[in-house]
Image (cartoon, grey):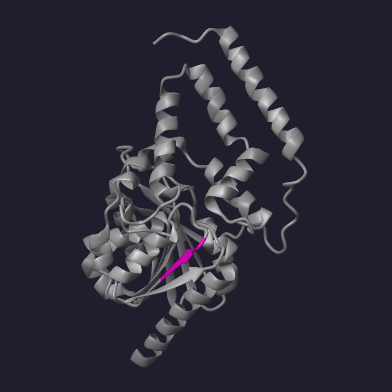
Amino acid sequence: MARTPWPALAVVAAGAGLGYAIERHFLHGRLAVPPSVGPELGSIGGETVHLDGPEGVVVAVESYGPVDAPQIVFAHGWCCTGRVWHEQVLALADRYRLVTYDQPGHGRTSRPATDTYTVDLLGDTLAAVIRGATGPGPIVLVGHSLGGMTLFNVSRRHPELFAERVHSVVLLSTTSRANVPDVPLGIGVQTAARIELAVSRLLGRVDRRVLGFTKAAYRASSDLSFLITKYLGLSRGATAAHVDFTEQLVLDSSMRMIVGLTPPVLQLDEDDGLDCLTVPTTIAVGTADRLTPPGLSRRMAARCRHAELVELAGIGHMSQLEAHAAVNAVIDRHGAMLAEALTEVA
């Protein structure tokens, strides 16, 4: 491969610097994040354990709340971590045992030894968390985006675990299938994944010095990336604090993980896992979700006879953040049903 001459590197750097300066001149100040009320988003740490997961993965798990309370397990989405459930921890940890974890290659959970990402890997990791990080008895499972896809995989490939442990399910901004020809997708998860794949392939052909500069720019938050995050992941009415938090989660994500998960997302078909859901299920989606548009949730609700559909008016993809009050109410309802079931057994 031909090496990029240093003068070309200087031109790239100068152009990037000029673009950044122009962007800051026109956008900076209007997008400043005001001080947040309460604990800083993502700052609440739980009781931490590390579990041995599939394919050499060491899984970071955090738990919150009384150990003898009804249990709720949360599976987060692509380019997030278990700390994305900040608003749920604040609202629900006083009366439920909340278990969050980082998916493989995310946050403090290691990547697979083979560096190969599959939905089966994600499903086996969630199964390991349920078996190794929860107490005996039934649980509520909550999955957002990729976490919902993970949940379908567990339902399909670990039916005995589902039958024995899962009382009910909450699905947020997700889909059981990526390619749905009869559903208008807008941008959609497929388009977003293809963009990531194209960028990664382009970067792979660039000289290592340029690549290093590009990766540094990728990790440097800017007002433009703030706007892109808000457009793709949240809604027009989202708070600056929630957008900033989401943006930082993405910027902190491993490019290797993003590229590795792109093919599984593009090829996702977990309809069989959706069909295996035989427990009370709530499917919630924002009407302004550009990554997993409402049509995908309507399709799942029509297919799953145990599902109730909740549409969140004007809300984007990160529903657990910007619509946390409504999402918390849904999760709380499932938690209350579980608590009632446990009381009847006792």
**Side of 170 where 96 appears, left or right:** right
Seen in the picture, residue 18 relative to 289 is either above or below; the reply is above
Query: Residue 314 appears at what percent x and percent y?
Result: 57, 63
Seen in the picture, residue 176 relative to 346 is either above or below; the reply is above
Seen in the picture, residue 300 relative to 95 is either above or below; the reply is above
Which quadrant, please, contains the C terminus? bottom left
Give the residue displayed 45% in from the left and 52% down from the top. Answer: 291
Tally the numbered discs. Answer: 0
What secondary structure is the magenta-colored segment mainly?
A: strand
Residue 126: quarter of image: bottom left
Give the residue displayed 64% in from the left and 59% down from the top. Answer: 237
Q: Which residues are magenta?
A: 283-287
Residue 286 is one of the magenta-drawn residues? yes
- Residue 46 visible, this angle: no
Seen in the picture, residue 198 relative to 131 is either above or below; the reply is above
**Side of 154 where 292 appears, left or right:** right
Which quadrant, please, contains the N terminus? top left
Give the residue displayed 47% in from the left and 39% down from the top. Answer: 254
Residue 130 is one of the magenta-drawn residues? no
Residue 135: quarter of image: bottom left
Query: Residue 9 appears at what percent x and percent y?
Result: 58, 14
**Side of 35 where 74 appears, left or right:** left
Give the residue displayed 57% in from the left and 50% down from the top. Answer: 246
- Residue 43 visible, this angle: yes
Closer to the camera in the image, 266 or 44: 266
Residue 51: quarter of image: bottom left
Query: Residue 185 appears at what percent x and percent y?
Result: 41, 52
Query: Residue 251 appears at what percent x and percent y?
Result: 55, 41
